[in-house]
Image (tube, helix red, strand yellow):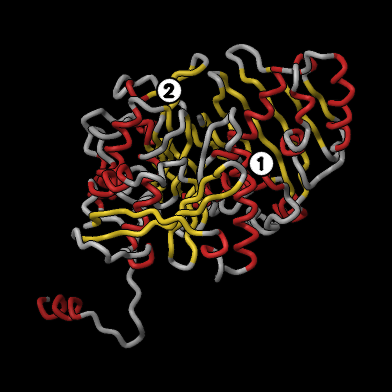
Amino acid sequence: MLSRFTVGNFLSFNKPQSFSMLASPIQKHKQRLFEADDVKLLKFSSIYGANAAGKSNLIRAMAFARDIIMHGSAESSDTLFYKLDPKANRLPSYFEFEICIGGKLYSYGFEIIIAEREITEEWLILLGSSKNQELFTRNSTTGRYTYDPTLLSRNEDVAHFKIYINDLKHVTNKLFLQDIVTNKEAIYEGNEKLAILKQVHHWFEALDISFPDSLVSGYSCFSTTSTDEILSAIKTFATGISHVEAKKVSKEKALEDAPSDFKKRIDRSLVELLNQNQPVTGSSGIRITCNGRLYLVHMNGKEPEFNEITFEHNKLKNVSFSMDEESDGTQRLFDMLTVLLCTKTQAVFIIDEIDRSLHPQMTVHFIRNFLALAKKKQIQLVITTHESHLLDLSILRQDEIWFVEKNALGASQLIPFDRFKERFDKKVQKAYLDGRYGGVPLFDSFFFPSGFVDDDDNEREDLS
């Protein structure tokens, strides 16, 4: 579960800004909180803001950090620093996740000079109510590193561990967390505490981040052998779909017209998927959109199995529709079904612009559905949205609402709604649209082409 995310010097974020899933002391909707290590975490959060305020940049920061953790920095973008500061290209960018694993809170983060693709610092800390415990830290500039010797139960493994971390003293394009879980199974045998490194790495493997134009994302293994549950969920959204079919196809057939770069991306995702499907971590899957067709992929042993999903409408048999023949709203709906049909015991979903192409009532219906499920399931959902109909304190808690807006220097700032101390019965939708909480565009003029005459102005002159 996610507790907090902090980012600095990335796209529109200048100084470090923190987004938190820590629950406030309010008593409303307590049944959908997650309790861990003397803290309570929210299972849902919504982020509002005007266009270009930085909502999507917050999600991009999470996705960028996840990619560095999984693949290193060698192929990362070198232009995503905060460009409104002339010095920012030479300064480190900051990424830190506070996450809950096994009821305990951990802080994992790193700093990277994006323009140079140079990772400068990295740390993993066990957070305590009175004292924190550094599990490992490293600085690739100075070569200094530390680690907690209690991670290793067997003395004979200390030398090997020192070699592993010493090998990365000055390596700047790879994180220690990635290196220590790659082809080093032997050191985990008999060292139970060391397993936290694999668990943290897997947390990022399983983190499901979806953008409106995502071609590859997780689906957390809702069944492809029986599509009844998918159909049942779709029917609640009044799409007109009457049947869902899953047809097994070969990988070669599914990707035959895909560009080579896309195929490489799929191969890399399949490697991650294979790693996720180890017995200790449970099963997962990925959703692929290729040439307008939707494929759900899961691992059958060590081999990927592709299933194309098609649809029938109005109970008309033998007339199937591929995904690109469905409306934009129906296509977007599948990002949402990923959440509702999740079979994992714990999962974190991040969806950017969830309301894109959706009717307002469909978005609200989905969130109500999720919040009901969240009372029983250990899943989290973070969304960015413009949907003001959700700003209803009979639906959401005050601490489940955040705003993003830019300051006078053009840097994005995160503002929690509960800072405003509104009453539980406050009608906040109108106040939000009126700009009371920030996070909305405020217009003070119109643009008219030269020579354009506003008829309303003429009428006002006539009346005078």
- The picture places residue 75, in percent across and down from the top left corner, at 72, 56
Q: Amino acid at mark 1?
A: Tyr
Q: Quadrant of the C terminus?
A: bottom left
Pinpoint residue 268: horizontal percent, then vertical percent: 64, 52
- In the rendered image, the residue lying farthest to the top is 130
Work out whether mark 1 precedes mark 2 in sequence or the reverse, and give the earlier one.
2
Name the kind of residue labelled 2 in the image: Phe
For residue 67, above or below residue 25: below
Q: Are marks 1 and 2 in contact (CB under 8 Å)?
A: no
Quarter of the image where one finds residue 332? bottom left
Q: Which mark is residue 34?
A: 2
Secondary structure state at the residue bearing disc 2? strand
Q: Nearer the viewer, residue 113 or 219?
A: 219
**Residue 278, position in %: x, y?**
61, 34
The label on residue 94 is: 1
Give the vertical position of 412 relative to 280 (above or below).
below
Helix, strand or loop for disc 1: strand
The residue at the point 67 percent across, 30 percent down is 198
State how many labels appear. 2
Residue count near mark 2 (Cα–Cα under 10 Å), binned few <14, some 14–19, many ≥20: many
User: Mark 1 or mark 2: which is in front?
Assistant: 2
Q: Could you say where residue 462 lies in the image, as x and y percent from the top left?
A: 12, 80
Q: Nearer the viewer, residue 229 or 433?
A: 229
Kindly tell me whether residue 142 is visible in this rendering: no
In the displayed structure image, the side of residue 310 where residue 21 appears, left or right: right
Q: Is residue 16 left or right of residue 375?
A: right
